[in-house]
Amino acid sequence: MLRKRSRLIAAPIAAVALTLTVAGYQASATGSSPSGGAERSGKVAEAAGPCLADATTLIGDLDGDGHPDKIVNPGHTGTKMTIQWGAADGSFGTKKAVSELLGAKKGEVASAAVADFRNDGTLDMVVNIVEPSGGDDPSTARLAEYRPGPLKRSDLGSAGSRHSDIGDHGEVQQLRIANYGDDPYPDLAILNNSGDGQLDRDVRLSYAGSGPGDFDYALKEKYGEFGSRAEPPAMPGDGWKQFYEPCS
């Protein structure tokens, strides 16, 4: 068995900080800044991409309209993710549950992971929808896809969607961002019900131009972990922090 491893004042301040963050993101994305040429160039390159408003909130352009969106991922599990689409004035719209946007049916669990998997400046998404078996035999996913950005607001669709085999090797319970390759390409950590009361941490490493790859037993031996419901495998909790800086 493998084992590797005062509130009244604070609220307005937080709101102002996020407003400044969005304004800075938009300015950097358009190349505008109050500073001139040489002084500006280095900072724009650093600030133009996604950033973290807090540990579980990523600010970045998910639909490709040039306005940053807000992606919130409570607990980093990918099962309760929400999106608020950004507007030209820097505000965010109403909170949308990713499970609803994906069309998850009653009794199904939708999991998602958001990152720039190809490191090409565009946020992408990996999605999985499965109806839990409720027993020892894992269910196969109804939908499992890698969706390179930009994504459609209506259903998170992508022109380049392709099947992902994450739903073919177990019943996905969580999707998390990880850094296993020690490179600029975010990887996936997957918490699976693998059957017979066992849970495992499966992995998919990402590569230039292709995003998350397919199942590789050698990589699972190197980076994965087997466990049980009583002693589940450890899962990464700081995946976004490995790739994105705090918003400022």
Image (cartoon, rainbow, N blue to C red):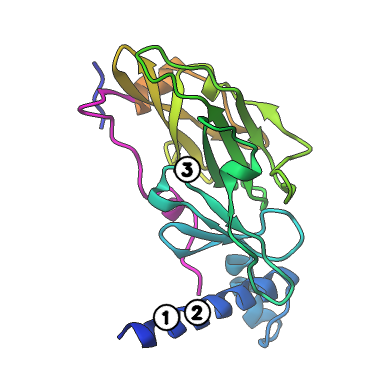
Task: Please tell me whether mark 3 sits on a helix, a strand or a loop.
Answer: loop
**Position above or below: 148 against 89:** above
The percent coordinates of residue 114 (x first, y second) are 56, 46
Residue at mark 2 to residue at mark 3: CA–CA distance: 25 Å
Count of numbered marks: 3
Determine which residue is flagged by label 3: 78
Nearest the eye: 140 or 22: 140
Q: Residue at x 47, y 43 (%)?
A: 78
Q: Residues within 10 Å of mark 2 (few under 14, many from 20)?
A: few
The N terminus sits in image quarter:
top left
Is label 1 in contact with label 2 (beta carbons under 8 Å)?
yes
3D distance between C-alphas at marks 1 and 3 = 26 Å
The amino acid beneath tag 2 is Ala
Say which residue label 1 marks: 11
- Looking at the rendered structure, the kind of residue marked 1 is Ala
Q: Secondary structure at mark 2?
A: helix
Residue segment shown in magenta: 225-248
The residue sitting at 51% across, 83% down in the picture is 16
**Residue of label 2:** 15
- The correct choice, above or below, for 237 with respect to 146 in the image is below
